[in-house]
Amino acid sequence: MRRQESAGVADLEPVVPIGELEPATGRRRRRSLRGHTTGIIGTVIVVGMALAAIVGPWLLGIDPNAQELSDRLLPPWSQSGDGSTLHILGTDDLGRDVLARVLEGGRASLSVVALGVVVGCSLGMTVGITSGFRGGRLDIVLMRVVDAQLAIPLLISALLVATILGTGFMNTAVALGIASWAVYARLIRAETLKLRGLDFFEATVALGSSDRRLVFRHLIPNLISTVFVVASLEMGGLVVTESSLSYLGLGMQPPDASWGSMIRSAQPLITTAWWLAAIPGTAVMLVVLGFNLMGDWLRDVLDPQSKQRV
């Protein structure tokens, strides 16, 4: 009996204390941080563009809506007629400073996109958690609604909602949120179903925890990393969508600057004043690239199932 008991004990895998696993996880994430060069580049781009949009207009000190017809269509690095102002990125057809308008447009575009992400994420998490947690017929109905939403392209859905709600900052943000919530709902529902099948969740249910405690104490904290990854990947597409809405006249309205409206205004002058379209277009490209690179990096770091770069 002693030999059998000792053999059975020997077959068991050694139990590693939880405290000893945390430094290894930390080291793995630090190696991922050092090794994922493109993710760091993307983060630098996003943070740099955000800081420029926030503090840039204040540091530059030029009114983005101030018109000076005598200085219209000046190329980059041109002095104003009176020599008092250096227009680093030139001026537009109304004599407004392009750099000031790009910075102000970046503040408006990124703010609208950030608010749209909050709206879409909140709505998507509510639907996803409700569907995955409750199950049954409610799950079937909600997922069919999600399937119908995902069948419509993001831009078409945003155009439809923006046409109904109208233009402006808040309406554009709501349109972006309503157009993108289904992506969050689908993934959150899948993560909720996975968490419900884990031992710790079943043990919590067996101990008699209320639904409110299960959702806010055990589900939502374990879904935060997934939400961050999805939001970072979705923001690039929402920047393009917001620029498209503004380009079509359904987003931010003049005289407020936005990258999409600047490109639309520059279209008739593309052959004579190339910088008017190239500069805001480059800003859109850099922000989308930065969000995509940062999103890929966050997925590798936060998703334990992804392949870590070491």
Image (cartoon, helix red, strand yellow):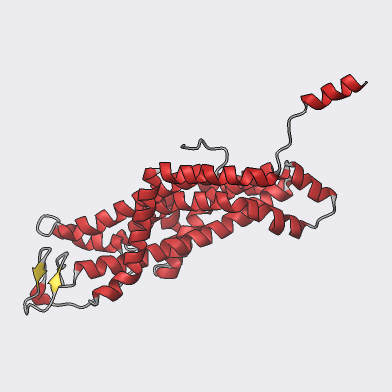
Foreground of the two, 203 or 98: 203
- Which residue does the image show at 45% across and 58% down from the upper left? 176
- Nearest the eye: 284 or 148: 284
Residue 204 placement, left or right of 68: right
Whether residue 139 sits left or right of residue 237 in the image: it is: right
Q: Position of residue 148 (x, y in %)?
A: 55, 46
Where, quadrant-wise, is the N terminus in this rendering? top right
Residue 39 location (% of width, % of height): 40, 46
| Image quadrant where residue 106 sits | bottom left
User: Looking at the image, which is closer to me, 258 or 207?
Assistant: 207
In front: 310, or 218?
Answer: 310
Image position, residue 110 (x, y; %): 38, 62
Residue 130 position, x and y percent, is 68, 53
Residue at image coords 6%, 76% = 81
The residue at 51%/35% (across/down) is 307
How many marks on residues? Answer: 0
Residue 114 showing in the rendered view: yes
- Report if residue 153 is visible in the image: no
**Does residue 47 sit above or below 11 in this rendering?**
below
Image-based side of 162 in relation to 71, left or right: right
- Residue drawn at (25%, 54%), measured in percent from left and top? 282
Q: Within the image, what quadrant is residue 249 found in?
A: bottom left
User: Furthest residue to the right?
Assistant: 1
- Above or below, 262 against 218 in this view is below
Residue 139 in the figure: left or right of residue 270: right
